[in-house]
Amino acid sequence: MDNYTSFFFLFSFFTFLFLLLKFGKYKTTYFFISFSFFMYLFNFISFQDIGNSFLNKNLLIISSLFILSIVIKKTFIIKYLSKFINSDMKLYFSSGLLSSILSNVTVTSSLLSIAKDKKALLVLSFSSIIGGTLTHIGTSTNIIASELVYKYSEQTIDLSIQNFLSFGIPIFLISSLFVLIISNFSFTKTIKDPDTFFFEVKVNPNSSLINRTISESNLRNLESFYIAEILRDNKIIIPNPDSLIKYGDILILAGDISKYNELPFLNEVSLIKKSSNLVLENMKEIFISPYSIFLGKNIRDIKFRSKYNMSVIAVYKHNERVPGKIGDIVLDKGDKLIVALDSNDKESFDFQFLNEIKSTKPLDTKDSLMFISLFLISIVSSLFNLVDLSKSLPLLIAFSILRKYLTIEEIKNSGLGFLVVIGSGLLISAGFHNSETNLLISDFLSTVSLSSFSLIILLFFSTLILTELFSNAVAVSILLPIGMLISGNDMSVIMAIIFAANGSFILPYNYHTNIIIYNYGAFSYSEFIKSGITMSIIYSISVLSSIYFLI
């Protein structure tokens, strides 16, 4: 192709990045799908490229590991670790090593209860990211990179665990300095849901609510309140539309206490007490994932009550409660919702749950040992090139389903929407290659007089910035082939780009583990940014130092 084609593709790509940065926060997945369609329409990618990007063994491995992590959470490993981990340094190494073979999202969410304060939460998130760089299967970025290196080196380079360990171990050890540095930071006290108030009202003898259901009384359509629970004869009833109200019932309401006088049945009930510390059995915290279909929609249009049997009590953005009518609130990634669940609730893959809505039955010791043994056998077999993970992991999933360690419903609800972005990232890489845009960029960089290490620094920070602004899939898919072309497949350049693509620490909403920690710990934006920059500096120094001494 000529340079005009390359310039047109480059212009289109930067336009896509601009639109993604400006408007894509609600529709990240759709933006990637749209740009993939654009590339196909203008012949930058072929139907074969689409098949190779979305139907390849590496995406199968990523999805399989993510699904099997559900079973890992049911074993005794997490319970055992909770007894062992009694310091931030132990938490750093434990979560990091676990993340080298498990999804770091799973590791982070599983160990939340162990992290007792904001410092520990940051250690948990960042160590799980860094720990994933230790192996070729530790993060989706590493798996994508392995595919790209194998492809663009014309099958002459096949990244192995030795490649990652030789760079990853010193980086992992040096980065542990963050644990010591963060101990000197001061954070605001974590207060969960400070503005969520509950109060109790008792149904009066002359109330028109008596012997009418919740639905008949229009109590599911209150503007500022929700009936969270009904207390009858010292027994708790989780309300649903058919729940009957009786004389003497105590209704536990959740909502904005300042609007108490707006209750439509104000004269038919008596206020008993107010409480901001009431613990309700059906109250849960959830947050919206970056790939949720709810992004950009208001709560009223989503119909939480009719479709998901849950009612939204409060919404938090950047850890601050959003005032006003809940139904008008437009959802964004990372938003935290306080919801009340009906007794027949069900999970949805559109949510990322901070607290389990349904308590998952743990595996007994025998089943835990059996699954862990088979999982480790699969991992070790792949490390010695005996059995490929693309074959062993799906078999282990099938085995887990047959043994009832895993259900089809759990797989559906596992949240695999991120695979669309990963596959689209591979398509973008193919578009750069097919349009010869990567050749154009490498020719330009070749005219700039740079030492080999200066080139590594340039590519490292370019990848780091792209990762922070967009995604690690985009960063590694674009810059890794370019770096390989410029350096002649130099391993130091390859590893610098891979480790940079993994280094998403600064922005709380651009990486799953950061989203979990940011919301769960109720961080202020400045607290997280300050900590993330500190971690990013330590990480960058450790990566570049390791590469410099290993060249």
Image (tube, rainbow, N blue to C red):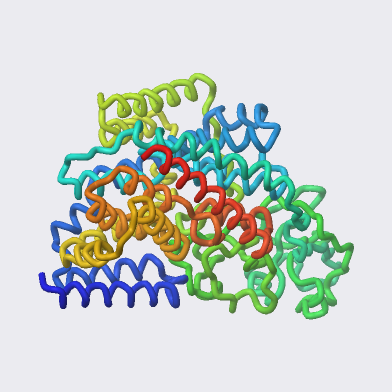
The percent coordinates of residue 462 (x first, y second) are 40, 61
Q: Which residue is drawn at 80% across and 55% down?
A: 278
Find residue 338 and report its image quarter: bottom right
Q: In which quarter of the image is the N terminus?
A: bottom left
Name the outermost residue toward the left: 1
Of 63 and 132, the residue lying toward us: 132
Q: Is residue 107 above or below residue 442?
A: above
The percent coordinates of residue 226 (x first, y second) are 69, 67
The percent coordinates of residue 371 (x first, y second) are 43, 26
Decide if residue 213 is in sight here.
no
Of 22 and 339, the residue lying toward us: 22
Q: Residue at x 37, y 57 (%)?
A: 459
Q: Is residue 138 left or right of residue 58?
A: right
Q: Quadrant of the C terminus?
A: top left
Q: Which residue is drawn at 67% across and 66% down?
A: 313
The percent coordinates of residue 202 (x first, y second) are 84, 64
Of 215 and 67, the residue lying toward us: 67
Of 18 and 157, the residue lying toward us: 157
Decide if residue 313 is in sight here.
yes
Q: In this view, does 85 lie to the left or right of 305?
A: right
Q: In this view, does 106 lie above or below 4?
A: above
Find residue 393 and report its image quarter: top left
